[in-house]
Every structure is written in structure tokens, then in C-alpha cells.
Image (cartoon, rainbow, N blue to C red):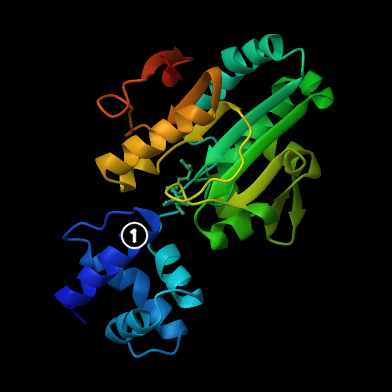
Amino acid sequence: MTLQESDFAFVRDFVLSRSAIVLEQGKEYLVEARLAPVARDAGLSGIPALVEQLRRQPSGALATRVVEAMTTNETSFFRDSHPFDALKSTIIPTLLERNRADRTINIWSAACSTGQEPYTIAMTLRENFPQLDSWKVRIVATDLAEHVLDRARAGRYRQLEVNRGLPALYLTKYFTRHGLDWEVTPALKQWTEFRQLNLIGDWGVMPRFDVVFLRNVLIYFDLDTKRKILGKVRRTMSRDGWLFLGSAETTLNIDEAFRRVHADRGHAYQNAA
Ligand SMILES: C[S@@+](CC[C@H](N)C(=O)[O-])C[C@H]1O[C@@H](n2cnc3c(N)ncnc32)[C@H](O)[C@@H]1O
């Protein structure tokens, strides 16, 4: 089946307006691969019928399924390990000093997908800073897609997923076995809170974040959207807080109010103002 140009254009505009994800010309194969199962599950004959249905009813469960199906949820434990090394070597030691009056640390994992990123943060903190037991640690983890958030909240992972990046020591210490799956311990869940948040929508009330992980999501957006989101992120951050982006992402030439700083073997961004 080949996707009609008008159906592709409809899906492209639909997804762009609801998520900011840009589907360039040439991504027709992706739309076909992702939406054919959505159409099938909805009892529709194919993507043309799905588009027809969305034109008639542009909101509701089917619309949500279409947008969620077009998100890419690739992630793993300890992905690009340097931000976690930086938490251990410099950032948390600095915050233990800087925040000692209110004994609070707020971290945001924006676009957290199935939760490996926020749980990696929690493990890094538990493993290296037992004194945080008496602190108020909040790891706010958000994503656009409810289906990944459900998995993140459950904290259950398949063997294949824990095999990717998770050291054996952490598996035995921070997970319990459930049949073929592994579930994170309550000690990790206790610090993490998951909520649905669209980066181009209303963020509601947010705490002031000491560290923000905004990794591997800006790549899907156009320049103007990146600029708006980075500006908004900057305003949620505490003075001298740290922002981590994915390895293919930068604030350079997008938001000059950020400056790039060394963070362990990699780099982070801080508010230069
Ligand atoms: C590739 S994953 C990144 C996961 C994790 N941060 C990492 O680096 O491993 C990108 C995530 O961004 C989410 N996403 C895409 N558009 C979004 C939006 N407009 N608002 C919030 N999250 C979005 C997707 O649902 C997906 O789970």
C-alpha cells in the first residue's frame, strides 16, 4: 500500500499541531508502519479510512493513539553515561552544599519515555549519596505519551531492557524478579513521580529544578519550537542549575542565554544570565 500524498499531509499537520513532531517529506514509510496497526486495531480498513475518521473526529481516543504512535520512545538505562557520572562527581556534591538549608533536590526528566532515565537518576543518587535518605528528593518525570508513562509508573522491564546498559550490581540491588520481568524497588519509586506533559502545552505548576534532563526529544522539533521550549525550561531552573541535552542536541545558536559548561567527561548547559 502506498500512502496518498494528501493523507500524508493530513497526518503530518495533525501530528505537528498536537506534538510539534516534524514529519518531513520522506517519512511516509514511518507513517505507514506506525499507523497501519492503529487502523487495524480500530477496525478500519487502512490509513485512508483512519484519516477520514480523524477528519470527522479530530479529538478523542483515536486521535491520541495516532499522535502517540508517531512518537519515538527509544531509551535505555544509563544512556550516554556522562550525565550520571556528572551527577555523582560534581552536581549532587554541589547541591548537598548549596541546598543544605532546605534539604531539597528537584530533578526533571522531561520526555522520560518508559522511565529508564528517571530510574537511572534515582539509582545514581541512592547508590552514591545515602545521606539523601533524610532529604526531600523529587524526580519529576514527564512525557507526552500515556502508553509509555503507564509502563514507567509500573517500573517493570523485560530481560532485554535490563540487559541494555544496566550494571549487574544495580539489577540485583534495585530490582526484584517478577516472572520474566524485573520491577524497580519501592526505594526508587518513592522519589519518582510521573505525569503527562506536552512540551508545547501548558506545564502547570512546576517546582524550581536543580537539574533538567531534556534528552533526545528536541531533535524531533523545528527551530522555533526548540527555542520556545528551551526558554521555558530555563525559566523553570534554579540559579546555576544544570540542563542535559541528548548527544545530537545543543542550545548553541538557539538559546544564547544558556552557556555550555563541562560536566564530567561531557557537558551540560547553565543559565548565563
Ligand atoms: C527518544 S525518547 C527520549 C527518552 C529519554 N529522554 C532518553 O533520552 O533516553 C523521546 C520521547 O519524547 C516524547 N515526546 C515527543 N514529543 C513530545 C512532546 N511534544 N512533549 C513531551 N514529550 C514528547 C516521546 O513520547 C518519547 O517518549
Q: In the rendered image, which residue does mark 1 sit on?
A: 17
The spot of residue 105 in percent (x, y) is: 68, 25
Q: Which secondary structure, mark 1?
A: helix
Where residue 63 appears, as percent x and y from the top left, is 43, 73
Res 268 seen here: yes
Around disc 1, counting alpha carbons within 10 Å, would you say few (fewer than 14), some (14 to 19), or many (20 or more)? few
**Is 51 displayed left or right of 272 in the figure?**
left
Q: Which residue is drawn at 40% across and 81% down?
A: 57
Q: Is residue 139 above or below residue 153?
A: above
Whether 25 is drawn above or below 268: the answer is below
Q: Is residue 140 above or below residue 124?
A: below
Q: Which quadrant: the N terminus? A: bottom left
As rendered, which of 70 and 127 lies closer to the eye?
70
Which residue appears at 56% of the width and 61% of the height? 146
- Please provide percent x and percent y for residue 135: 79, 24
Identified by mark 1, the residue type is Ser
Residue at point 44%, 18% (across, down) = 271
